[in-house]
Amino acid sequence: MAVDSLVGTVFSGLSALVIEDVTEGSGMVVVTARTRDVAIPCPDCGTVTAKVHGYHQRTVKDVPIDGRQVVVRLRVRRLVCPALGCRRQTFREQIPGLLDRHQRRTARLVRQISHVAQELRGRATARLAGLLAVPVSRSTALRRLRRLPLPRLEIPRVIGVDDFALRRRQRYATIIIDAETGRRVAVLPGRDAATLESWLREHPGVEVVCRDGSATYAEAVRRALPDAVQVSDRWHLWRNLCNKVLLEVRAHAGCWATVNPPANLRPKDTTLLEKIAAACPEMTALASLVCGFAALLTPAAGNDVKLTEWIAQARAVNLPHLRSLTNGLEIDWSAVDGAVTLPYHNGRTEGVNTRTKRIMRQMHGRAGFDLLRHRILLP
């Protein structure tokens, strides 16, 4: 009864077996068990049999108990197939869901090691597993990580595309995600147009592509998906505007040099603001243009027309740095148009890139591209 009670509580994961004894020694728990005396089908012909030809011993590890390793000494049967003509005269029985072929760990222990390796990789997994009474080598941890199945590839309607550095200024890769859910879809070696174009041609179904201002990606999408809508990332548009505004402010710094500078400036000091505006009308126009552009970054129907009007206003003012921004907007007009009118964005791609950098720091640059790609695509 004591053994039956342990099976129902501590060893519930071994309920498919008949546990005959549980002993303790050398800092581990040893479980002696055997398979049940039931008929099972032949793996080749499917004929059900319970005729025993012999027995084999398997020694496997299970999840730890009370900080101690658990070793299962299991007796399995070799059965005889009664079907005439079956190529398997005898076969060793398997325990699906509990123990896979040629494995020395139970399926649930393998799952635990795999999930720890998914988060920590090789050496860190080996260190932590040792403390948890599940000793594994870093090579075993990485092998379990590589065997984790990737999710089934489903091509989304809206994708986000961005690059990240494998080795800064030398090697880069491209990541593709579902822009609506953030699900990782693919990781491509390199960031050239041919690589992305080839992937898009091999995986049809994409209708909208969110990207930054990369002319390389823009050309790849145009060649592979001429009918797809391209959406420029609004954060990059705002950053480009901020950079140009900073240059304009620096260029006009002398305009308010005689105004009484910074110790007397308060948020609600309208008198000082009026003096600054009077000293440099270009800055007044610049402030108005910045506010107008910020309003366009909330996507809405009709923003494309407003953007055209904003560009005309920006070119009518003597602000050369801002004028260069408008030239860039017109070069990538269709994507910018999509950015201010459609709800899609590349923000989730940037979030995935941040996660990718954390993974690369954990691996300290020792992982090859295949292992890194596998790690990124795992859910």
Image: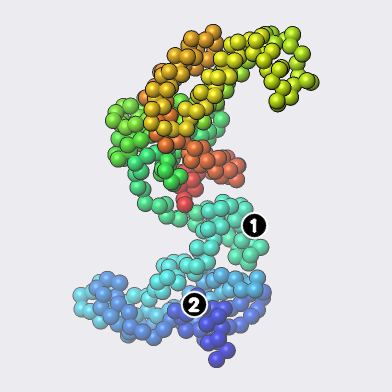
Quadrant in which the N terminus is drawn: bottom right
Q: Residue type at mark 2?
A: Leu
Could you tell me if residue 211 is visible in this image? no
In this rendered view, identify the residue nearer to me: 36 or 222.
Answer: 222
Residue 127 has which mark?
A: 1
Hey, which residue is sitting farthest front in the picture?
Answer: 271
In this rendered view, identify the residue nearer to me: 268 or 189.
Answer: 268
Residue that appears at 44% across and 33% down: 299
Assign a secondary structure to mark 1.
helix
Residue that appears at 35% across and 47% down: 154
Residue 14 has which mark?
A: 2
Nearest-to-viewer mark from 2 and 1: 2
Could you tell me if residue 108 is visible in this image? yes
Residue 62 horizontal/vertical position (percent):
54, 71
Q: Residue type at mark 1?
A: Arg
Residue 323 horizontal/vertical position (percent):
50, 13
Q: Quadrant of residue 22?
A: bottom right
Residue 112 horizontal/vertical position (percent):
53, 63
Per the model, the C-alpha gap separating discs 2 and 1 is 27 Å
Task: First in sequence, mark 2 or 1: give its number.
Answer: 2
In this rendered view, identify the residue nearer to me: 75 or 118.
Answer: 118
Residue that appears at 36% across and 84% down: 38
Residue 229 horizontal/vertical position (percent):
34, 31
Above or below, 169 relative to 330: below
Above or below, 114 relative to 192: below
Q: Quadrant of residue 160?
A: top left
